[in-house]
Image (cartoon, helix red, strand yellow):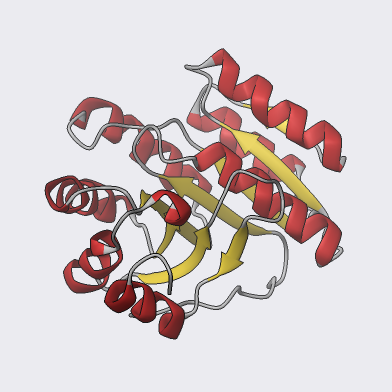
């Protein structure tokens, strides 16, 4: 199991995008990381969302942004995304929330690709639920890896009865696991991935 330690900011803002299917907890995960960067690491953080299809998603992220006191911009087009990133060039970290996409919806995945091409993120994290079955995990990897995902976040580890998804991600992709989420609390329930602990979970089950 490969893991990727959190990267330090390079010159200019570090742009980090998050992609994945619907229902994996992407927006909550972004809020957790934004709070960690802002509070624990004292970074200047900004949020951008292109998930304007769901009003509730924008409102949810705005609530988190207000609580941790970071700017948030919602964009509708790739060009607006380009302008938003340029306007936030003084920030240390820019986190981009994307709309959840079914791995079977090729049209909307193509639209997402255009946004990512404009953003040219330093990191693109694919959020995969640890509760996903084998066929679902394979489909997610097959459709989202071509979008440029270079990290994976395993969400809902606390909800998994077994850890086959962890093993499947490691076996079927070269992606390193960056973080795992272990609950709904913001910002506490997210930790940097540890290969040994993940291996212990696969072998020993939830109690490991």
Q: Is residue 79 above or below residue 156?
A: above
Q: Quadrant of the N terminus?
A: bottom left
Residue at the (35%, 54%) spot, across then down: 130
Q: Is residue 7 above or below residue 125?
A: below
- Give the camera-side residue of 181 and 12: 181
Label tally = 0
- Give the camera-side residue of 79 and 207: 207
Residue farthest along the bottom direction in this orientation: 196
Residue at the (87%, 40%) spot, across then down: 69
Residue at the (27%, 56%) spot, across then down: 145
Residue 14 location in percent, x, y? 65, 61
Q: Is residue 150 visible?
A: yes
Q: Is residue 36 above or below residue 29?
A: below
Q: Quadrant of the C terminus?
A: bottom left
Q: Quadrant of residue 165?
A: bottom left
Q: Is residue 191 left or right of residue 10?
A: left
Residue 28 location in percent, x, y? 59, 40
Q: Is residue 155 visible?
A: no
Residue farthest along the left direction in this orientation: 135
Residue 174 location in percent, x, y? 27, 73
- Give the camera-side residue of 68 and 9: 68
Residue farthest along the front direction in this orientation: 207
Q: Is residue 145 above or below residue 192?
A: above
Q: Is residue 190 left or right of residue 102?
A: right
Q: Is residue 150 left or right of residue 106?
A: right
Residue 68 location in percent, x, y? 84, 42
């Amino acid at each position: 199991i490969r893991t990727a330690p959190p990267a330090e900011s390079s010159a200019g803002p570090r742009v980090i995008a998050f992609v994945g299917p619907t229902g994996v907890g992407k927006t909550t995960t972004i809020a957790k990381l934004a709070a960690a960067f802002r509070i624990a690491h004292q970074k200047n953080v900004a949020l951008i969302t292109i998930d304007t299809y769901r009003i509730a998603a924008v409102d949810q992220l705005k609530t988190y942004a207000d609580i941790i006191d970071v700017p948030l911009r919602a964009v509708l087009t790739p060009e607006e995304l380009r302008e938003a990133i340029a306007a936030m060039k003084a920030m240390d970290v820019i986190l981009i929330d994307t709309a959840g996409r079914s791995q079977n919806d090729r049209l909307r995945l193509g639209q997402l690709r255009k946004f990512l091409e404009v953003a040219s993120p330093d990191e693109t994290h694919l959020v995969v639920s640890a509760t996903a079955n084998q066929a679902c995990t394979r489909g997610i990897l097959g459709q989202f890896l071509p979008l440029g995902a270079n990290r994976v976040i395993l969400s809902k580890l606390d909800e998994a009865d077994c850890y086959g998804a962890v093993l499947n991600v490691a076996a079927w992709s070269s992606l390193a696991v960056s973080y795992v989420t272990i609950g709904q609390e913001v910002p506490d329930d997210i930790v940097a991935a540890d290969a040994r602990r993940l291996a212990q979970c696969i072998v020993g089950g939830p109690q490991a």
